[in-house]
Structures are given as C-alpha cells and as structure tokens.
Amino acid sequence: MDKTELMKDVLKVTGIAPIIAYAEPEQAVPAAKALVAGGLPVVEVLMRNEHAMGNLERIARDVPEIVAGAGTIITLDQAKAAIDHGAQFIIMPGIGRQVVEYCIDKKIPVILDGDPGHDDAIAWVLARASRELGILAVTSCCGNQTIEKTTYNALRVCTLIGLHAPVGKGCPHPLLNDVMNAPSVHGESGLDGPALPEPAFEASALSAPELMAKVLRESPEPVTIVATGPQTNVAALLLAHPELKCKIARISLMGGGIATGNWTPAAEFNILVDPEAARIVFTSGVPITMAGLDVTEKALIMPEDFERVRALGNPVSDIVAQWLEFFYKFHRSIGYAGAPMHDPCAVMALIHPEIFTIRPMYVQIETEGEYCRGTTVGDLLGFSGHAPNADVLMDVDRGRFADLLVEAIKFYGEAEA
Ligand code: BDR
Ligand code: CA
C-alpha cells in the first residue's frame, strides 16, 4: 500500500492520523503548519537517520502542536512506545500496517465521574474490563449519597476491581440545590449489599474538578468524561477551566429522559439533583452522549442474567451478582422486570455504539418550572431550529447488552485482571 493510501486508511479508521515523514525540518515545518492550520489533529514527525532527534526537536519548537516522539524509530515496539507517549501517527516503511492496527487497538482515554451507587459500580466494572477504554482518573460526586460516602465507595470499588487510577473527591453539594440523596434505591451506605474490601489507597489531594483539569491538561489527546451522577463536578470543571473545553472529546452521561422522569413525573434523578450543572454541560458545546431513561429502562438485566454473572465464579462476578440482586429488589417493588442498567449504558455506548438506536437532538434543561425543574426537554420534532447538541440513546438491543456485560465480567477471572 502506498503512503497516501495508508494515510487515508489511518485517518478513516482512527480519526487521528495525518502523517509527515520528511527528512528535514525545512520541509517538515511548513507541511506540519499547513496540516495544523487546516484543522487536522496533532502530527508526529519522525525520521530514521541519526539526526532524527535534533530535527524533531527543531520541528516541535516551531510547531507546538507536534507531539515530540521517542526519537529515531527503528522497530515496531519503539513505534508503539511513541504512540503511548501521545504520537498521533508514525509512518515507517514496511511496518505501516502493523502500526495502523496498533492505532486501532489504542484505547479511548476516559475519566469516570460517578456517585457509586450500584449501577455506577457496574459501569466501572464494565469500563475497567474493556480493552477499548483507558481509565485516567476516577472522580466521585454527590448524588446517590453524600460526597463522603460516594468517595469511600469509589475507593472501595476501585480496590475491588484493581483500578489503579487517582480518585478525586467531588463537590460536596450541587451548584444551587440542597443535597438530595437516594437511600431508597442504594441504601444508607450508597452501596448496600455485599461486603467490599476496604480501600487500598487514599483519595487524591486534588478535588474532582482539579484532578479532571490536570488529566485534561496533561493528556496529549482529548479525553472523554463518563459522568454517571449529577453533573456538578463537570460543570465546576467547565466553569473553572473554560480553556480546557477543547481537551474534552465527549461527555457520555447518564441523565434525563426525553419521554419521562423517575424522580418526578418529568425529571430523572441525576438531572433533578443539579439542573444548573446539567444546563452548563448541555450548553457547553462539548459533544454529548445522553443515556437517559428512554434507553436505560430498556437495558434490563434479568434475574436469569444474575445467575450467568454469578456462574462466572471470579472475584468480581459474585459481588456484581449481589449488587444486581440488591438493585433489583427496589425496582421489582415498583414494577420492573429486571435491574435497569442506567449507568452502564453511558460506558457501553462508547465501546459498543452499534447496539443502540441513537438520535442526534437538541436538548435543553429546564431549571425553572412549577412541575418541570430538572427536565431534559428534547426537541424531537425540530421545533427549536437549533442544531443537535446531544446524541440521545433511544433504544438498545437488550439481549446483546446483557451478553456483552456478562462477557466483560469474565475479564476478572483472567490473568491480567
Ligand atoms: C440514576 O440515578 C442514580 O440513582 C443511578 O445511579 C443513576 O445514575 C438513574 O436515575
Ligand atoms: Ca449514578
């Protein structure tokens, strides 16, 4: 395959990969500048002669968008190391195809923000098990329980699943609302049910918004935030660091519902807890995936699926089965046929979008209203004339969802877990 074809191929499949493979800065600098000016992503420039490192440094000085790489690259392993350092593309005659495959295998960098919570915890179990996601940080938020309890739960869950990422404690209360928790659903601890290991490490000294900011600042590529609680931390981040908005690739959130609410007739819990924060997020211009009740109440894990999870017989599967049972007990009492996997939808949408029906839509957050505070008003019929600001999940292949979740939990019985 010639280089142009390879370039197109890489760009098509990864969305990240223009190339320059010139020998000299005199040629590379103008070409890199043109690519950057044309809106193409960061460019890696590598050469294969002894002058490579010096040349690379000169080019990176002139074009700051260039991610300086690992120097002269002569093997596939060195190419992979450079990609791990943030190189967005490398071309090496002869091994281009393997590098392309490596790029495809590259993980989506994510921050997990949530209020565990049974379904948050299962969402994190799924994220940790997935080979598509690279978890850079975890942040707790105030929602299902107080920030003290959800932070403790976040640390316990990370310890259970061997997730070694910094954990940032979130904002203690919503932007304007008083604290509102959900002990009827998740219990007094916020994660009642099976005994969990005590945290093997402490929370970061940085608050959730500051930890998010640090991760975004340091990441060579935009990061996706998976927000499965109220949007308080994300809104605080956007307010404090508007300059980092461009480093957020997407916010995949659980919240709202176009057709219905679950905490009032019109509002879903996460949005109702902090409608002002949700409004900041939905008007931020950052791409949003919205997993609202329209889809999450269809993503049911049935009692027979609990048994499939339990039968996996690994250190995490038994706990997940008990979480499912606990979560289902409340939902069965109000008429559900299974346990709704609200929060795991926000993760599954990133790794298996093909199992969802997705409708781009303009969604506004009602912050006033006698009956409708906290409602996600979806412009299904296009009345507003606004361009869509969210990819709204409307339906899911339930069977595939359940199979994929069960399959993912096998990871915890494998050597690398
Ligand atoms: C949402 O509310 C919380 O109780 C769950 O964790 C989920 O994020 C569903 O309305
Ligand atoms: Ca949650």
Image: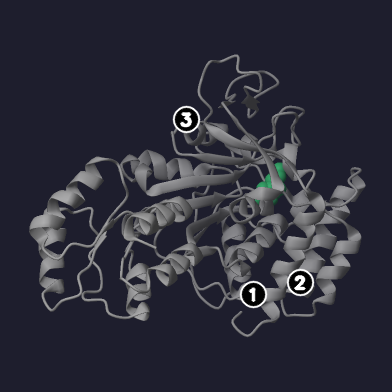
- Residue 177: x %, y % from top left: 57, 35
Q: Name the residue under label 1.
A: 160
Label 2 neighbour load within 10 Å: few <14, some 14-19, many 20+: some
In terms of secondary structure, where does tag 3 sit? loop
Q: Is residue 412 above or below residue 403?
A: below
Visible residue check, residue 94: yes
Query: Label 1, label 3: how many angstroms apart (C-alpha)?
Result: 36 Å
Identify the image quadrant of the C terminus.
bottom right
Q: Mark 2 touching mark 1, by CB under 8 A? A: yes
In terms of secondary structure, where does tag 1 sit? helix
Q: Is residue 37 above or below residue 155?
A: above
Q: Which amino acid does label 2 sit on?
A: Ile
- Residue 283, label in figure: 3
Marked residue nearer the N-terminal end (2 or 1): 1
Marked residue nearer the N-terminal end (1 or 3): 1
Question: Is 369 left, or right, of 281 in this rendering?
Answer: right
Q: Name the residue under label 2.
A: 319
x 21%, y 76%: residue: 72
Q: Which amino acid does label 3 sit on?
A: Thr
Foreground mark, 2 or 3?
3
